[in-house]
Image: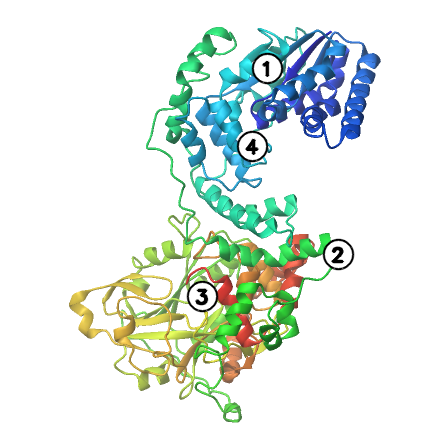
Amino acid sequence: MRIWLHIGLGASVSDRIQRVMADKREQMIAKGILFPQNVSAALCRAARGMAESDAAHPDQQGALHAQLSADLAREIATHQHDTLILSNAQLGQTLCLTSELERLKALLSPFSDDIRIVAQVDEQARALVRHYEAQVMTGRHAPLERELGLATSKDWWQSAIDGAGHSGTGPTSDNAPFWLDYAAVVQFWESGFGPNSVTLHPDYRQKLTSDTAPDVIRSLFEIAPTLGKTQAEPFSPPPSAAWLSRARQMNVLFHHLTRSGQRIIPPDLWQALLAETEIEGEPIAPRTLSAISNRFAKDNQNLVETHPALNAETLRPPSAQEQWSEADPGNGFRATQYLLAFMYRIDKATNAAHKEKPAPSTNPDIAAGLSPAARAVMPPLAVQNFDKLRKSSYAPHNRLGAVNEEELAAAYSLAPQRILPRGSSGRVIVGCMKNEAPYIVEWIAYHRAIGVDNFLIYTNDCTDGTDKILNRLQQMGIVQHRNNDDWRGKSPQQHALNMSRKEKVIRNAEWLIHIDVDEFINVRTGNGTLDDFFAVVPDATNVAMTWRLFGHDGVTRLADEFVIDQFEKCAPTYCPKPHTAWGFKTMFKNIGAYGKISCHRPNKLDEDLRDQVRWVNGSGQDMTEEVANNGWRNSRRSIGYDLLQLNHYALRSAESFLIKRQRGRALHVDRSIGINYWIRMDWSDFRDITIKRNIPRVRAEYDRLMQDDALRKWHEKGRDWHRAKARELRKNPEFQELYEQALAIKLTETERVAYALALDMET
């Protein structure tokens, strides 16, 4: 009987071959070929495990050998075939000691004296890239500089083994791949199984993605009969170089976190967390590893001459390029920010493993100042922030611009419709939307009621009917809607804003406003209209409309009610940290002073018009010097809410938050909306009902719009879509866990600032 020992060397290729053989197992048995899958999987563990356990566990060594030998004997006796195939890529990527090879031979020799070794190889730079990708996605934290350094070593095989200390060299470890030295691989295995026992083949990657995969098996193991076709199975696309940079940095932190044993990250959670850092981009180019290619070029020429299955193309190096350096992880990525966001799930996994509660804070004085809810969830860095914050001038409070709510009883009166000069589009909101159907009509009605004249709305990738609602509103003469599905650049939002400058409604505008559908301009002077505000600041050309962040306020379900009526609880007025609390959007006069509309403000100031620009804050105070050139948030010097604020309902209900998390972000499209977003945005400490004075006139405009049957139909369909989507997402364990985690977080305003600062990526 001949034994074919398939040792890889490409793990993904070997896995694919094993799946095809498992699928064809019965057919192969009928043709006299045996592939005992379970025995193959245990071979590496037996060879390496026995070698390591010689002194300490001789009984386990003997039991392992006896069990595997018995399993193999049973398979052979049952089928009595002439050919036995054993396939395990870990054999080629792990065994490197003579003692290991001797033990493997001792296991197999009783069954055959005709043992052939088969390995599949690819050019070393290409093979290293794929190996590095697999290592990083399963825990590697060392960059590729180590392998590039080995390229100058005299003996790659031995240098790689010495550097690893033989602590494991499979794709789940951090060790350099000694087996890239294919000439040394042949020499090592033939030292154990005899001269000419090793055959090298190409990795046949392209053929394994089609129904020709059985032909690859026939070629590798010299099988004469046909095996029939099999289902095509393409390989997964490689991760981007930027994603690998992110994942490797996360691995550094994960290893540091788990080294002491106080935290446990199970492998499935580890890989799931790495998956959440994904970012698109180009993969690592093998041609940037030309030092590796050059190191093995001469050996490869000799291998092509001595192994007929190989040809010059198999081991041809890619054209050289500038040497590899680790890719930029993109978009201001900080691994520590993601780690803090992941800590809840890591602690949950740790507690499940230990079956005990997390240890209390090591500093009882700090812990004493925290609420019980905060002590349960805040990581050490957030606790340290809390201790510093509560003693500083940055501690949040609600004493800035206090409002007497007894004076808010009287509702605002209806404002007359503005008559615009010929050719003017007046005050124009330009906005972007994706899957916002339940909220659109209220938002349009509200801003029309306070004096906005026109709307230019861009949408992309809508599935809830948002585009249908806006199309109908356009037919009614209320908005202008543009499709933005073909957006390019870093975000759909910025692409839309760039395109908007070509629109007549924008060129002819008196004032331009870029806000989102979860933001409401809350005028707090006079009759609450923009006319009333402008009357107080007649010289202003730019208005910083500062956010007041409103939390979910205990509302969990999506209701068909006004947003401005449901949510009353918000952030304190004095909240200089974190950066999001005092962010602003800008309403600016269309005098041509700025050449670009950006998310928070206009940019590219024309120096010839600098003297005409006057920025004011929400209290009407001048802040031109501070923000004329850049900046998108207020400072302690420039904050003001007395006349106007921007109510920002970033979360709405807890179910709406799940849908927003699933939908993604308009500006930072690569950043997920997870628990870190909730912590930064769920302010429910203080009450602000100033906007409710608008409800009667908003209701009148809303009801007028909803008299249109088509608009009402699309609104109701959108509402039902969102309710169904919320139910669907809550059936997904990941989203249900996020939902429960979010509702369990109950923090004071100071605790929330401390936690948000620990999570903050932008500052």
Q: Amino acid at mark 3?
A: Asp
Secondary structure under tag 1 reads helix
Figure quadrant of residue 744 = bottom right
Number of residues whose C-alpha sits closer than 10 Å to that of mark 1, classed few (under 14), some (14–19) or many (20 or more): many
Residue 174, percent from left and from top? 54, 37
Q: Which residue has dot 4 on it?
A: 165
3 vs 2, front mark = 2
Image quadrant where one finds the N terminus: top right
> What residue sits right under mark 3 in the picture?
516
Task: Measure the alpha-carbon separation of dots 4 and 1.
Answer: 20 Å
* Residue tagged 2: 355
- Quadrant including the C terminus: bottom left
- Tell me whether circle 1 and circle 3 mark residues in contact (CB < 8 Å): no
The alpha-carbon separation of the residues under discs 4 and 3 comes to 57 Å
| Foreground label between 1 and 3 | 1
Q: Check disc 1 and give the amino acid type.
A: Trp
Name the residue carrying label 1: 189
Q: Earlier in the sequence, mark 4 or mark 3?
A: 4
User: In what element is the residue under mark 2?
Assistant: loop
Looking at the rendered image, the disc whose residue lies closer to the viewer, 1 or 2, is 1
User: Which color scheme is applied?
Assistant: rainbow
Q: Amino acid at mark 4?
A: Gly
Q: Which residue in the rendered view is the most extreme toward the bottom?
A: 406
